[in-house]
Image: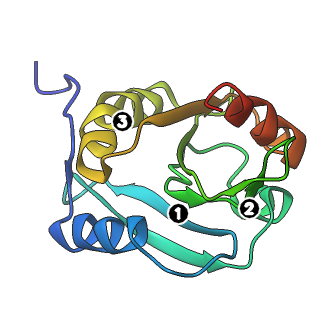
Amino acid sequence: MSDSLVVCDVDPMLTEMLRKFRFRKETNNAAILMKIDKERQLVVLEEELQDVSPEELRSELPERQPRYPSAVGYKYVHDDGRISYPLCFIFSSPAGCKPEQQMMYAGSKNRLVQAAELTKVFEIRTTEDLTEEWLRERLAFFR
């Protein structure tokens, strides 16, 4: 049983950073890239990115390791010209990852989504999926 799935907690400093990110005043695209620190069993900050397109964010994601490029603040221009800045949670779980890693990330995802208080939750199975078009299609559902 010692090898059973352990759901990780969220680093309190990351929780505070996510809260501040939700209420940020900037209007540029930004992202907080998070990973699991296996030794501490915590979801922690890996990197904060400013002025980043979905394609640039994609290049920051490992191709064979899960990640949470969560809390993506994205400038979304609606068909009628309105502009909104939705926050999205994206779970990257590429095929070819170690099953143990996939389970740790999948098992910790809900706790992280709750801590970040996000409602727009998406998953990608290959980093190539993360494009501007893909993100716009997903966000169109929330008009």
Estimate how packed mark 3 is, as few (under 14), some (14 to 19) or many (20 or more) residues with alpha carbons within 10 Å. Answer: many
Above or below, comparing residue 67 to residue 45 in the picture: above
At label 2, the amino acid type is Leu
Above or below, comparing residue 11 to residue 140 in the picture: below
Q: Which residue is mark 3?
A: 109
Label 1 with label 2: CB-CB less than 8 Å? yes
Q: Which residue is mark 2?
A: 57
Question: Residue drawn at (11%, 27%), measured in percent from left and top?
Answer: 2
**What is the CA distance from the residue labelled 1 to the residue labelled 2?**
9 Å
Looking at the rendered image, the quarter that the C terminus falls into is top right
Q: Where on the picture, by quarter, is residue 10?
A: bottom left
Q: Where on the picture, by quarter, is residue 106?
A: top left
Tell me which numbered mark, 2 or 3, is placed earlier along the sequence.
Answer: 2
Above or below, comparing residue 106 to residue 1 in the picture: below
Coloration mode:
rainbow
**What is the CA distance from the residue labelled 2 to the residue labelled 3?**
19 Å
Estimate how packed mark 2 is, as few (under 14), some (14 to 19) or many (20 or more) residues with alpha carbons within 10 Å. Answer: many
Question: Residue drawn at (24%, 64%), measured in percent from left and top?
Answer: 15
Residue 118 left/right relative to 75: left
Q: Residue furthest top?
A: 1
At label 3, the amino acid type is Lys
Q: Position of residue 20 (x, y in %)?
A: 33, 74
Secondary structure, mark 1, is strand
Q: Where on the picture, by quarter, is residue 18?
A: bottom left
Q: Which residue is mark 1?
A: 33
Of 124 and 100, nearer the camera is: 124
**What is the CA distance from the residue labelled 1 to the residue labelled 3?**
13 Å
Looking at the rendered image, the quarter that the N terminus falls into is top left
Tell me which numbered mark, 1 or 2, is placed earlier along the sequence.
Answer: 1
Of 34 and 1, nearer the camera is: 34
